[in-house]
Image (tube, helix red, strand yellow):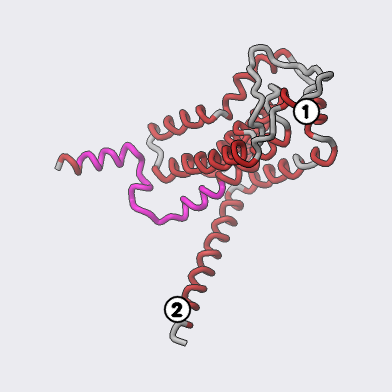
Amino acid sequence: MSFEPAKRAGYDDKYKKSMKQLTAIRMVWYENELFFYLLTLLLLIGFLPFFLLDKVSFLIWLKQWHHPVVDCMAPYWTWLGDGVMYIVLLWMVALWRVSCRRLLVMGGSFVSMSIVVQLLKRVFYTHMVRPIALLPGDKTLHLVDGVPLSRELSFPSGHSATIFLLITVIQLLSIDKNKIYSVFLLGLALTVAYSRIYLCQHFYMDVYAGAWIGTIAAVVVYIAVMQVNGPKWLDRSIYGWLCTHGKGIKK
């Protein structure tokens, strides 16, 4: 009987923690309502092609349209979803004296997303090949000159995951929740993700799964980091922390 109060206290702590997390999720949704409504709608509509065509037939159908201007732009536009570009942006943001907490959201979500993507690619779905390795021999698709085509590690799309992670992080961390701004971010992510299909680097299902992974990683890490009542340095910039730390060493 002496253990009952301790057990009850443990249950109460778990209940309070779960309620706190639920409240945090509601607040994130409320503050970014238009963005998440549009994103959810896009992802739900995006599930429809899986009922209509197999992945090869759907790729062939999508690849029927092409344009010389898009041929010139797509190889460069697709780099916006590259991990290297994200890391460069992270360094630029760090030099811009953004708080360590925000940097932790950006860096932590990218690391989490990368782990999930690489595990799926290299452990669970290594058998899934790229479009160029699976297309029927009698089908000739429009290919962009000068773009090397990969043949392995197709699922999921890392570029798609990265760009959806990026726009979600920008939306969550931005102070001004402008509606036009949210629409622009979603348009950016959609065009970058589509470029992976246009360049014949991924099937639609690879891109779709990547979008989910990037979005979820950003939201989960954002909520986790923002709830931390950690040390004071979390809310300082790296520059400010180094200055303070340097003065302490000199003394």
On residue 59, which mark appears? 1
Residue stretch in magenta = 219-247
The percent position of residue 154, horizontal first and vertical second, equals 66, 32
Spatial CA span between label 1 and label 2: 59 Å
The percent position of residue 34, horizontal first and vertical second, equals 65, 45
Report the side of 197 relative to 234 (left or right): right
Q: Earlier in the sequence, mark 1 or mark 2?
A: 2
At 74% from the left edge and 45% from the top edge, which residue is drawn?
Answer: 44
Magenta stretch encompasses residue 242: yes
- Where does the C terminus fall, quadrant-wise? top left
On residue 198, which mark appears? none
Residue placed most toward the observer, 107 or 50: 50
Residue placed most toward the observer, 73 or 134: 134
Report the side of 52 relative to 45 (left or right): right
Callout 1: SS: helix
Magenta stretch encompasses residue 109: no
- Residue 101 drawn above or below residue 19: above
Q: Which residue is mark 2?
A: 6
Residue 138: quadrant of the picture: top right
Q: Amino acid at mark 2?
A: Ala
